[in-house]
Amino acid sequence: MSGERLRVRAANLGKRFHRVHEKPMLLREAAMLFAGRRSRIDDLWAVRKVGFELAQGETLGVIGANGSGKSTLLALVAGTCFPTEGTVSTRGRIATLLTLGAGFHPDMTGEENIVASAALIGIPVDEARRLTKKIVDFAELDAAIDTPVRHYSSGMSGRLGFSVAINVSPDILVIDEIFAVGDIAFQAKCIHEIKQMQARGITMVFASQSPMFLADFCTRALWLEQGAVKMIGGAAEVGEAYHVSMTGTGMMDRMGSVLSH
């Protein structure tokens, strides 16, 4: 793959967390320390030995059941956590939406959070202020933009986060579960914008549990199972294999059954 077009490269990527099996109370912990004992701790590999490359304009869908490592992999790509082993490198400005409202300061207004979020990815304050109206209009938050974010609903926070992510001119867009953002009407607007960004050659990484989403929006897909790569390849092929694994039937079989009723 041409280095000039390469946007994301992950090699032997792994993230380990420590899992404590006992959460002792203060007095019990003191007694254990006095006796020379410790709570039992072992390692949990959320992601391990994951590798892929993404070129400019490609959209990678990451699919898997809850707990499979999707969110951790996206966080590694976004740079919001660091790998325990392996490497991940990106080229260009990254915009992310990993958790609704993540990164927003609850005591700051929506507008203040827009400027602060933009500054975190290197956008000058003056430019961020110029983008504010466009971001607010897309998020449909004109009446609440001067209100502290702590008073926002999860839907409002999600709309603001998505609007910031798509309007800061990213080269790479990383989003966890796009269908968690806003109501159905806003989701439709988000999907339209994603299609426009794809047409402009923006590289994207999405996490989803929907094989249909992969088939409709992604060029490639990566199926995670217990933190490891189960399958990687064309989005439709991976989505179909995942669907069969989860349901025992193919997507077209399922659609035919629904339509026949």
Image (spheres, rainbow, N blue to C red):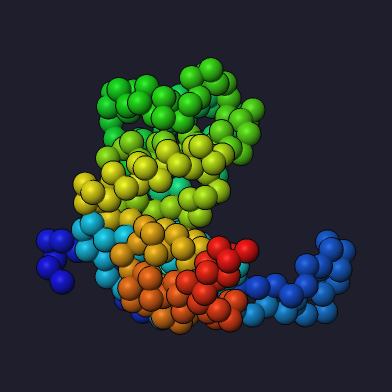
What residue lies at 41% left-to-right and 24% top-to-bottom? Answer: 137
Q: Residue furthest front?
A: 260
Image quarter of residue 37: bottom right
Image quadrant where residue 81 sits: bottom left
- Tell me if 125 is positioned left or right of 16 in this view: left
Task: Answer left or right for 158 relative to 120.
Answer: right
Work out whether 7 lies above or below 191: below
User: As rendered, which of 208 and 10 lies closer to the eye?
Assistant: 208
Frontmost residue, 116 versus 54:
54
Residue 1 on image: x %, y %: 15, 71
Q: Quadrant of the C terminus?
A: bottom right
- Residue located at (41% from left, 75% from top): 238
In the rendered image, the vertical position of residue 145 relative to residue 11, given as above or below: above
| For residue 29, side relative to residue 199 (left or right) | right
- Position of residue 147 relative to residue 113, above or below, is above
Q: Is residue 101 visible?
A: no
Compared across the picture, whether 45 is left or right of 202 comes to right
**Residue 114 location (% of width, % of height):** 42, 30
Residue 250: tell me if it is visible: yes
Q: Where residue 157 sits in the image (x, y, percent)?
A: 55, 36
Residue 54 image position (x, y, % from top left):
26, 66
Residue shown at 32% from the left, 47% from the top: 195
Residues 232 and 212: in front is 212
Residue located at (12% from left, 68% from top): 2
Q: How many numbered discs, if any?
A: 0
